[in-house]
Image (tube, rainbow, N blue to C red):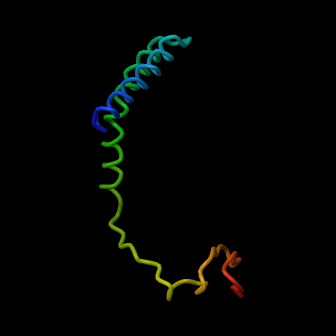
């Protein structure tokens, strides 16, 4: 069995489980319960579209590599708010 088939079976099993939990749950508004049932099954198909639309609307920002020459601490280590950690003497 391939990874895609295993992922599909896992997705269907998990979605079915969550769908049953929602079905057994007590809701004051039955319309909301129906909307949740539909949303549970549509979410895996909507998520990639939402992510794609987010990345398409972002400004094109040029990424710059933080080379060793550009770093505040040349020895490496963690540096935040002027406080160096585990990188030797950063002062």
User: Where does the N terminus fall, quadrant-wise?
Assistant: top left
Which residue is rendered at x = 35% and y = 64% of the image?
A: 59
| Foreground residue among 17 and 44 | 17
Residue 80 to residue 52: above or below: below
The x, y position of residue 77, in whole percent, is: 62, 76
The answer to which quarter of the image holds residue 2 is top left
Which residue is rendered at x = 35% and y = 34% of the image?
A: 44
The x, y position of residue 36, in whole percent, is: 44, 22
User: In the figure, is residue 1 to the left or right of 74?
Assistant: left
| Foreground residue among 47 and 11 | 11
The x, y position of residue 51, in whole percent, is: 35, 47
Numbered marks: total: 0
The answer to which quarter of the image holds residue 87 is bottom right
Which residue is rendered at x = 47% and y = 12% of the image?
A: 23
The x, y position of residue 16, in whole percent, is: 41, 19
User: In the figure, is residue 61 to the left or right of 79?
Assistant: left
User: Where does the C terminus fall, quadrant-wise?
Assistant: bottom right
Residue 87 to residue 14: above or below: below
Which residue is rendered at x = 69% and y = 78% of the image?
A: 84
| Foreground residue among 54 and 84 | 84
The answer to which quarter of the image holds residue 46 is top left
User: In the figure, is residue 21 to the left or right of 11?
Assistant: right
Residue 60 to residue 3: above or below: below
């Amino acid at each position: 069995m391939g990874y895609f088939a295993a992922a599909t079976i896992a997705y269907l099993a998990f979605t079915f489980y969550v769908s049953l939990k929602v079905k057994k749950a007590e809701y004051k508004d039955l319309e909301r319960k129906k909307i949740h049932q539909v949303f549970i099954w549509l979410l895996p198909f909507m998520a990639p579209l939402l992510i794609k639309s987010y990345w398409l609307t972002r400004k094109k920002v040029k990424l710059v590599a933080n080379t060793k020459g550009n770093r505040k601490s040349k020895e490496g280590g963690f540096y935040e708010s002027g406080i160096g950690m585990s990188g030797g003497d950063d002062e």
